[in-house]
Amino acid sequence: MTAADHGLGWPGHPDQGGAAPGDEVPSGAEPTGRTAATGLDPAFAAAGPGQPTAADYRHGGEPGDVTAPDGPDGLGWPAASLPPAPVIAGTVTARPGGSATASAGFGVGDLGLGESDVVIPVVSEPVSDTPIARAARAALTARSGSPAWPRPSACRIITIANQKGGVGKTTTAVNLAASLSMHGSRVLVIDLDPQGNASTALDVDHHSGIVSIYNVLVDGQPLAGVVRPVAGIPQLYCAPATIDLAGAEIELVPLVARESRLVRALAGFDSSGLDYIFIDCPPSLGLLTVNALVAAPEVLIPIQCEYYALEGLEQLLRTVDLVRSHLNPGLTVSTILLTMYDARTRLASQVAEEVREHFGELVLGSIIPRSVRVSEAPSYGQSVMTYDPGSSGAQAYLEAAREMAHRNASPA
């Protein structure tokens, strides 16, 4: 009698030392014998897709052992019914006494196994491409900070200004600073807004009465005395603002060189250890904003993708021209960032097209979309880069910061 007469195949593969089709099976063999590979009943081994067979684990067997019927693919069932095969990335061999060895590739016959060795195939699952998986990979990339981005040859001082409120000045300052810090740059954020929102987002204490940027502008205290490190993000620092700054607009009026108070403070501050200084301005064109424009050679303008933002842009550019003519000849608009983009509206795309048409290469390629995560992050004292680095808003700011680092690696 042959194994085929049982309808159960044969004990093993010819190149593994087993019998071939038509070989005689000892008369004592019964269909209920164990399989050579698993020691399981043949009915289980031949149950269908997903069950192991002797062809899957060729460990050899004893005379009289039989296996599941061999289909067209040599695995015991038709190839069309097979599930997607896992990728065998390697094996782990466990030996008595607790020792174990690993090998690349699944070649049991090449491992020199002993009788008591157990071989465990290591299965490599295919990479998932679901939205959650993509967000997780993006979060890991953002948090890893690798590779480091180019750093400028000298510290770049950038004022982030727009007299229209709610366009994302503070959000832009905080998240660009966090992104650059996480990729090797040393960044200082100067909060020049009496509301102190940048200080809140970076979780830096700014209650009334503490030493802040107000004391630098009005009392002439050194800037180094108010700079604080940001917890959780190495190489990121903040000069906080308190509510006292609200009265600075009036208190600065009688002071000598009132428009140059901040630039003098920066001149006395050792910025050699920094790569970027971002100055977050209030939503106005008062003395605080003028101080910021006088102190920096570069202006970054966040523009909300709505009609009112275009109306206010003309007035801001006129102010920049006045400051350039009388107070800071080196001042230039170096970067424009489109924010709060809503892809569902035609108006947003029209505003983006008009801004790009007028300002050309000054406009960053990255556009910041409306994102709930960006709005939620400050309530937890975090930037969106640490709160939810896999969100669309975090990825947009990360790309904007990368673009700034690469295209403006040297001071403007």
Image (cartoon, rainbow, N blue to C red):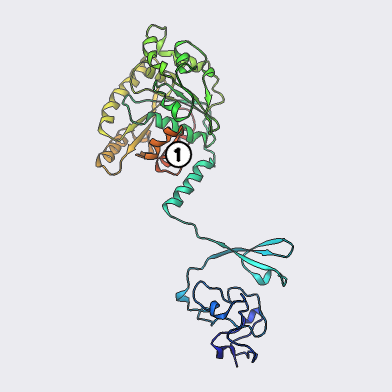
The quadrant of the picture occupied by the C terminus is top left
Picture coordinates of residue 398 (x, y %)?
A: 45, 39
Q: Residue at x 25, y 33 (%)?
A: 307
Residue 248: x, y in percent? 39, 13
Rendered location of residue 262, percent (x, y)? 45, 16
| Quarter of the rendering containing residue 399 | top left
Farthest residue toward the right? 97
Q: Is residue 281 above or below residue 8?
A: above
**Residue in view at x 32 percent, y 33 percent:** 304
In what element is the residue under mark 1?
helix
Image-quadrant location for residue 366:
top left
Tell which of 368 and 310 is nearer to you: 368
The three-letter amino acid code for the residue at tag 1 is Leu
In the picture provided, is 352 more to the left or to the right than 70?
Answer: left
Rendered image quadrant of residue 45? bottom right
What residue occupies the far bottom of the structure in this picture? 1
When the figure is inspected, residue 412 is found, relative to residue 249, above or below; the finding is below
Residue 193 at x, y = what percent?
Answer: 40, 22
On screen, residue 102 above or below 330 = below
Q: Which residue was labeled with disc 1?
A: 398
Residue drawn where x is 54% and y is 80% of the image:
43
Toward the viewer: 200 or 170? 200
Tell me how many marks there are: 1
Q: In front: 298, or 94?
A: 94
- Name which residue lies at 48% across and 28% down: 411
Few, some or many C-alpha atoms within 10 Å of disc 1 (few <14, some 14-19, many ≥20)?
Answer: many
